[in-house]
Amino acid sequence: MAKPAHLLAGLLAVLTLTACGAQTTTAPAADRDTVSVSGEGSVKARPDVFSLVAVARERGDDIAAMKNTVDEQVQAMLDLADDLDIEEKNVTASDIQISQEWQYQPERKLIGHQVSREVTFKVSGVDRYARLADGLAGQGIQEVRPAGSEISNADELAKQALEKAVKDARDKAGILARAAGRELGEAVIINAQGYTMPQPMMMRAAMAKDESTESYRPGEQNVSANVQITFVLK
């Protein structure tokens, strides 16, 4: 997944920096010459937390036997997670699901049942992700699907992007001030317009034991921020 939307919510409020108090002689921003500019900042990072869903599924008529087989497959998945040092809190095994299977042509007819359970894994590091996917394939699990990826320190990267956006705005304002023969003063209005976190991305899970770790490439993503700042001109 991605980081939650409340991340850096406090930093996204409009901050109005003005002098106040009965003794102040500083003129309001509206009475001073100002320049308003936008700033952008971004930081690149690679996802390092990955989610994967594996399904143990059996079809037939003997529900009890199918349940035993599915439970054995799920236990093998859990054992694999232990072997890969995946924390127990990051592995979720669903309850058993039993459904009927019907044939509709040439007439509606019950042809059997389906028993299934899902196991969801959340792992750190692309190497462990690769070993998990390959291990599941080696167990004969036919249904394995990626369920997204995250950047573990995205909140810190968002702060860095915001700092870069503010610097970018100051640099732009400085250029305008110098071109106009003025000096750049303090920032009187700072509006953090928003930031963009990478959306959870899907990464292919290998389905053959001979695929190497190098085939897993999550790629880089941008964490970016935008600000609008008004500076006083001296």
Image (cartoon, rainbow, N blue to C red):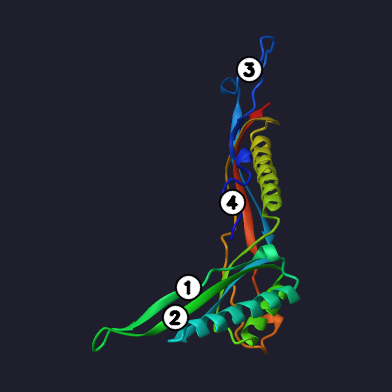
Q: Which mark is residue 26?
A: none
Name the amino acid, label 2: Gln
Name the amino acid, label 4: Pro
> Viewer-nearest of labels 4 and 1?
1
- Quickly name the residue at label 1: 97
Rounded to the nearest whole Å, what is the CA distance between mark 4 and mark 1?
30 Å
**Residue 67 to residue 160: above or below:** below
- Quickly name the residue at label 3: 27
The residue lying at 62 percent from left, 38 percent from top is 10
Pick the front one: 233 or 84: 84
Query: As drawn, is 142 to the left or to the right of 62?
Result: right
The secondary element bearing badge 4 is classed as loop
* Dot placed on the residue nearer the N-terminal end, 1 or 2: 1
Q: Are marks 3 and 2 in contact (CB under 8 Å)?
A: no
Where residue 105 sits, quadrant-wise, is: bottom left
- Quickly name the residue at label 2: 114
Rounded to the nearest whole Å, what is the CA distance between mark 3 and mark 2?
76 Å
Measured as percent of width and height from the top left, residue 4 is found at 59, 51
The residue lying at 54 percent from left, 84 percent from top is 142
Q: Residue furthest top?
A: 23
* Dot placed on the residue nearer the N-terminal end, 3 or 4: 4
Question: Which quadrant holds the C terminus?
Answer: top right
Q: Are marks 1 and 3 in contact (CB under 8 Å)?
A: no
Q: Are marks 1 and 2 in contact (CB under 8 Å)?
A: yes
Q: Are marks 3 and 4 in contact (CB under 8 Å)?
A: no
* Dot placed on the residue nearer the N-terminal end, 1 or 3: 3
Rounded to the nearest whole Å, what is the CA distance between mark 2 and mark 4?
36 Å
The secondary element bearing badge 3 is classed as loop
* Dot placed on the residue nearer the N-terminal end, 4 or 1: 4
The residue lying at 56 percent from left, 49 percent from top is 5
